[in-house]
Image (tube, helix red, strand yellow):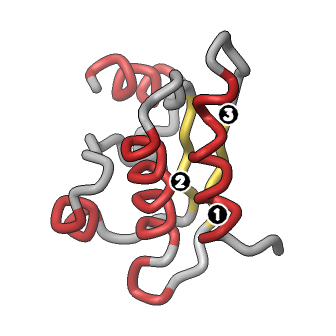
């Protein structure tokens, strides 16, 4: 987390960006984070088990729809060796999120 905070500071966006830990699937912790305009996910998929991948998708959805909002989720993804292991994440995102 410290590296993320330093990155925000070094890029002059610390006032506009909030860096916070988020435990996927922990509904109370996710709700406590509040609302966001954009949920940015980068380098979060590494061939996780289905339960972990779907927890990430559901957490993203909860963050994007907190308090009835319609926030955007941006996911940066790089296909690695276990590409098929990441399919459950994309399936769950397809089920939860609608295209604009």
- Looking at the image, residue 46 lies above or below residue 19: above
On the image, the x and y values in percent for residue 99 come to: 81, 71
Q: Position of residue 9 (x, y in %)?
A: 42, 27
As drawn, which residue projects farthest toward the top? Answer: 81
State if disc 1 and disc 3 touch (CB < 8 Å).
no
SS of the residue at dot 1? strand
15 sits left or right of 82 in the view: left
Residue 38 to residue 5: above or below = below
The N terminus lies in which quarter of the figure?
A: top left
The residue where tag 2 is placed is 39
Circle 2: is it few (<14), some (14-19), or many (20+) Cα within 10 Å?
Answer: some
Q: For numbered disc 2, what is the local secondary structure?
A: strand
- The numbered mark at residue 27 is none
Quick check: 99 left or right of 46? right
* Label 2 – label 3 distance at C-alpha: 11 Å
| Residue on which the image places disc 1 | 72
- The residue that disc 3 covers is 76
| Residue with the most extreme bottom position | 68
Q: Where, quadrant-wise, is the C terminus in this rendering?
A: bottom right
Q: Answer whether labels 1 and 2 touch (C-beta < 8 Å).
A: yes
């Amino acid at each position: 987390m410290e590296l993320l905070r330093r990155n925000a500071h070094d890029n002059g966006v610390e006032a506009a960006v909030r860096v916070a830990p988020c435990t996927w699937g922990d509904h109370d912790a996710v709700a406590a984070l509040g609302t966001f305009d954009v949920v940015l996910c980068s380098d979060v998929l590494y061939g996780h088990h289905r339960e972990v991948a779907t927890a990430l998708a559901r957490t993203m959805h909860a963050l994007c729809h907190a308090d009835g909002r319609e926030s955007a989720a941006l996911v940066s993804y790089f296909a690695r060796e276990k590409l098929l292991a990441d399919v459950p994440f994309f399936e769950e995102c397809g089920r939860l999120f609608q295209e604009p």
